[in-house]
Amino acid sequence: MSTPAPRPTEPTPPKEPFAYVSQERGLLTLKIREPILMGLFFLAFTVVGVIFFFMVKKGADQGAEGAMGVAFLILAVFGGLGVIGMAIAAARWRWKREYVRIMGRSPWT
């Protein structure tokens, strides 16, 4: 009784983290497949939030009522979304590097 020779199996690609980011969707949705571009976008998003914070804080320093609350809200929204987006981009960047190493090609080609 002979055993069949093992067939070479194709490598299995690693599971994509946050796969919904690169899926085809409808109008007015953000789709940035490349992790580096996504990281830069959310870094800019965070920087804009910090700039808005200081602009509103300047108004608060000049006596505008309730401006500091708005300033901290702007910072929380822009900064929070920016940091979350950069964390997702970092996870996707690590995944893409591993995918290219195993599969030998970009995941989107």
Image (cartoon, rainbow, N blue to C red):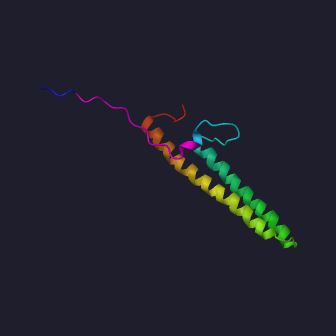
In the depicted structure, whether residue 95 falls above or below residue 106: below
Could you say which is closer to the camera, residue 35 or residue 21? 21
> Which residue is at a point 58% across and 38% down the rendered structure image?
23
Q: Is residue 52 left or right of residue 13?
A: right
In the depicted structure, whether residue 107 falls above or below residue 94: above
Q: Which secondary structure class fits the magenta region best?
A: loop
> Which residue is at a point 54% across and 43% down the rendered structure image?
19
Q: Residue furthest left?
A: 1
> Magenta includes 32?
no
Could you say which is closer to the camera, residue 98 or residue 30? 30
Number of disc labels = 0
- The N terminus sits in image quarter: top left
In the depicted structure, whether residue 109 falls above or below residue 37: above
Could you say which is closer to the camera, residue 8 or residue 1? 1
The quadrant holding residue 66 is: bottom right
Q: Is residue 99 left or right of residue 26?
A: left
The quadrant holding residue 28 is: top right
Q: Residue 57, how many percent across, how many down?
A: 80, 68
Q: Residue furthest front?
A: 26
> Which residue is at a point 66% across and 53% down the rendered structure image?
43
Q: Which residues are magenta?
A: 5-20
> Which residue is at a point 54% across and 46% down the rendered structure image?
18
> Magenta includes 16?
yes
Q: Residue 74, how many percent across, how many down?
A: 74, 61
- The C terminus sits in image quarter: top right
Q: Residue 14, how many percent across, how many down?
A: 44, 42
Q: Is residue 107 left or right of residue 1?
A: right
Q: Residue 58, how many percent across, how many down?
A: 83, 68
